[in-house]
Amino acid sequence: MSKTTILLAEDEPALGQIIKESLETRDFNVLLCENGNIAMDVYHKESPQILVLDVMMPKKDGFTLAKEIRAIDDAIPIIFLTAKSQTKDVVEGFNIGGNDYLKKPFSMEELIVRINNLLNRTQIQKSSEILKIGNYSFDFPKQILHFDGIEQQLTHRESHLLFHLVQNKNKVLDRSLILNKLWGIDDFFTARSMDVFITKLRKKLKKDDSIQIINVRGFGYKLVF
């Protein structure tokens, strides 16, 4: 079995080498890059399976790099490493499309657990089926909502969240379960991020009055139509 390739972008040489060597002892193939520009080149050349990106990097920071990669790849898992701990920074990381956010200093065991969690997470089977949501048609693979000839392009996170809501139509979608599945962690910051995406989905589904995304306080959300 071939090794999983991790693209690690970290501008602190000592820390980068420690992370690289620790991950290699767990049988990962690690591509260490010292800045975002190099990381982007390596991403195109090597096709890694997961990205571990420092946020504060010279030439191109981790957030900018993630935005550029998310524009062409909505599936690859992304973990941010950062000393920044303000709520707005954490929320921005998840809104960009990050799957996890690890604050420095961290233990290598924690990073490895989070990497394995993302790699082992059950992938949604992308069928060609068009899902009906009231008077909307939802093309999940293409991440497009259709209504009366008008198309709305959804983001990666919006699409996956809506898919799970549809799959659990008229049932409560457990908040903790979906946060762990789509964000990789259930905490205050990811919960706030999820609330933002729910609000966005409500706006995009507002043309059909029969559709509601109900907040079941303390439990989660329920899509009704």
Image (spheres, rainbow, N blue to C red):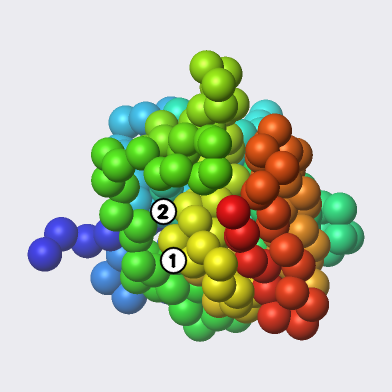
- Residue 181 vs 158, above or below: the answer is below
Q: Which residue is at a point 67% across and 29% down the rendered structure image? A: 59
Residue 125 position within the rendered picture, expressed as x and y whole percent measured from the top left: 29, 54
The quadrant of the image that shows the C terminus is: bottom right
Residue 174 position within the rendered picture, expressed as x and y whole percent measured from the top left: 60, 76
- Residue 146 vs 28, above or below: the answer is above
Q: In the image shown, does 136 or 110 lie closer to the viewer?
A: 136
Q: Which mark is residue 203?
A: none
The quadrant of the image that shows the N terminus is: bottom left
94 with respect to 38 (left or right): right
30 with respect to 104 (left or right): left
Q: Are marks 1 and 2 in contact (CB under 8 Å)?
A: yes
Residue with the most extreme top position: 149
SS label for mark 1: helix
Residue behind mark 1:
118
Q: Amino acid at mark 1?
A: Leu
The Cα–Cα distance between marks 1 and 2, rounded to whole angstroms, is 9 Å
Residue 175 position within the rendered picture, expressed as x and y whole percent measured from the top left: 65, 74
Q: Quadrant of residue 61?
A: top right
145 with respect to 191 (left or right): left
Q: Dot 2: within a 10 Å radius of its alpha carbon, few (fewer than 14), some, or many (20 or more) residues?
A: many
Q: Which residue is at a point 76% across and 82% down the rendered structure image? A: 218
Q: Amino acid at mark 2?
A: Ile
Q: Which residue is at a point 69% across and 54% down the rendered structure image? A: 212
Q: In the image shown, does 71 or 4 lie closer to the viewer?
A: 71
Residue behind mark 2:
50
Question: Which of the marked residues, 1 or 2, is nearer the chain's N terminus?
Answer: 2
